[in-house]
Image (cartoon, helix red, strand yellow):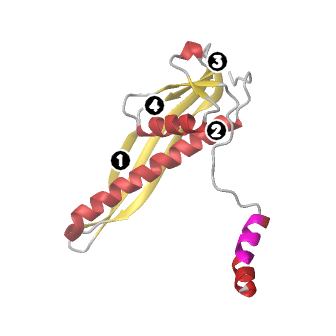
Amino acid sequence: MNRRLFLAAIPAVLVAGCGFQLRHLDELPFASLYIDAPHGGAVAQRIRSALVSNNRTRLAASAAGAEAVLVLGQEARSKTILSLSGAGRVTEYRLGLRLTYGISDKEGRALAADETIELNRDITYDDARVLAKSAEEQLLYRDMEDNAARRIMRRLQSLKPGNSTS
């Protein structure tokens, strides 16, 4: 019995010893943040959810009441044909997500230069599995939106309040 307990404890000790931690949101350098985004933007919604669950940075109701302002551009999705079969049927698509964002203080001074995030995912396609491939496509778009939101959050975490790049 002791040997089984010892063998079961080895992986836990190794994981704890290597510094492994679950991914979490570190503290943002701002007490409050206003998100200026087009209505219905999935990336903006993911950032809002992360901030609400964090309870460290308050979401401001207006830009005037915020220490920093995150301005998100329109999210642009794309779908292009990547390859065709010998019979001329589509076998692969390339899905894309493009989003531009900027960060400024409440007076409008840029805290970081505007950046564009472009993400791509390749997906195989089969006419016999239209519903499954449609669900996979939506899953890949959701993954790209999550990735974009994490990138923006990391960028926000790296900023120092009061430092503008004008």
The residue located at (48%, 50%) in the rendering is 119
Amino acid carrying label 4: it is Gly
Q: CA distance from mark 2 to mark 3?
A: 17 Å
The residue located at (60%, 19%) in the rendering is 66
- Report which residue position mark 2 lands on: 155
Going by the image, does 112 lie left or right of 125? right
Q: Is residue 10 magenta?
A: yes
Amino acid carrying label 3: it is Arg
The residue located at (72%, 82%) in the rendering is 7
Q: CA distance from mark 4 to mark 2?
A: 16 Å
In the image, residue 117 above or below residue 133: above
Q: Nearer the viewer, residue 142 or 164?
A: 142
For label 3, the crowd category at 10 Å Cα-Cα, with few meaning under 14, some 14 to 19 and many 20 or more, is: some
Mark positioned earlier in the residue sequence (1 or 2): 1
Q: CA distance from mark 1 to mark 4?
A: 16 Å
Q: CA distance from mark 4 to mark 3?
A: 17 Å
> Could you say whether the residue bearing mark 1 is in a helix, strand or loop?
strand
Amino acid carrying label 2: it is Arg
- Report which residue position mark 3 lands on: 109
Amino acid carrying label 1: it is Ser
- Report which residue position mark 4 lands on: 73
Mark positioned earlier in the residue sequence (1 or 3): 1
Marks 4,3: beta carbons within 8 A: no
Residue at the extreme right = 17
Question: Which mark is drawn over residue 78?
Answer: 1
Residue 35 coordinates in the image, percent (x, y): 51, 26
**Bounds of the magenta span?**
9-16
Marks 1,2: beta carbons within 8 A: no
| The quarter of the displayed image where residue 106 is located | top right
